[in-house]
Amino acid sequence: MTESENPKRYDLEERTFAFAQSIREHFRENKPAYLDIDDAKQLIRSSGSVAANYIEANENLSKKDFVMRIKICRKEAKESVLWARLLKMPDTYGQEATELMKIFGAILEKCK
């Protein structure tokens, strides 16, 4: 079975995109309270940064560049956990951000 035929194929680029997209959809459906607007914007930015930096990591010019981008992904995922908690988002958002943070941490460990 080829990678494209495997239904369990793990696509982190798609997963990070889906995470960023789900955050945006949540706020389209649930407008944040006035006092939460800045935190919501931060969560939108950090979730998108996870996805964007992972794409950049895949286009790396060197191992050093790859590691730097993955570190940024981990940092932005960790930041997303904070904003999701402050906004009292449903647990699934914080859990996904935490899982992504752990995945990026594992990738960094393998790069050592």
Image (cartoon, grey):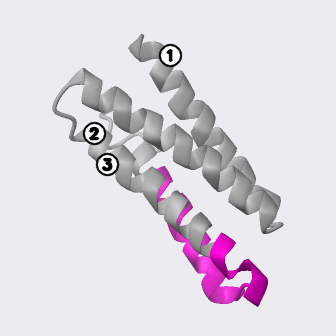
Position of 111 relative to 36 (above/below): above
Disc 1 element:
helix
Horizontal relation, residue 98 to residue 25: left or right: right
- Residue 22 location (% of width, % of height): 58, 69
> Which quarter of the image is occupied by the N terminus?
top left
Instruction: Residue under label 2, please give it.
Output: 58
Q: Which residues are magenta?
A: 15-39
- Residue 71 location (% of width, % of height): 45, 33
Residue 26: mark? none
CB under 8 Å between discs 2 and 1? no
Q: Residue at x 64, y 76 (%)?
A: 38
> Label 3 crowding class (10 Å Cα cut-off): few <14, some 14-19, many 20+?
some
Horizontal relation, residue 82 to residue 6: left or right: right
Q: How many marks?
A: 3
Instruction: Residue under label 3, please give it.
Output: 55
Q: Residue at x 63, y 55 (%)?
A: 80
Residue 109: mark? 1
> Label 1 crowding class (10 Å Cα cut-off): few <14, some 14-19, many 20+?
few
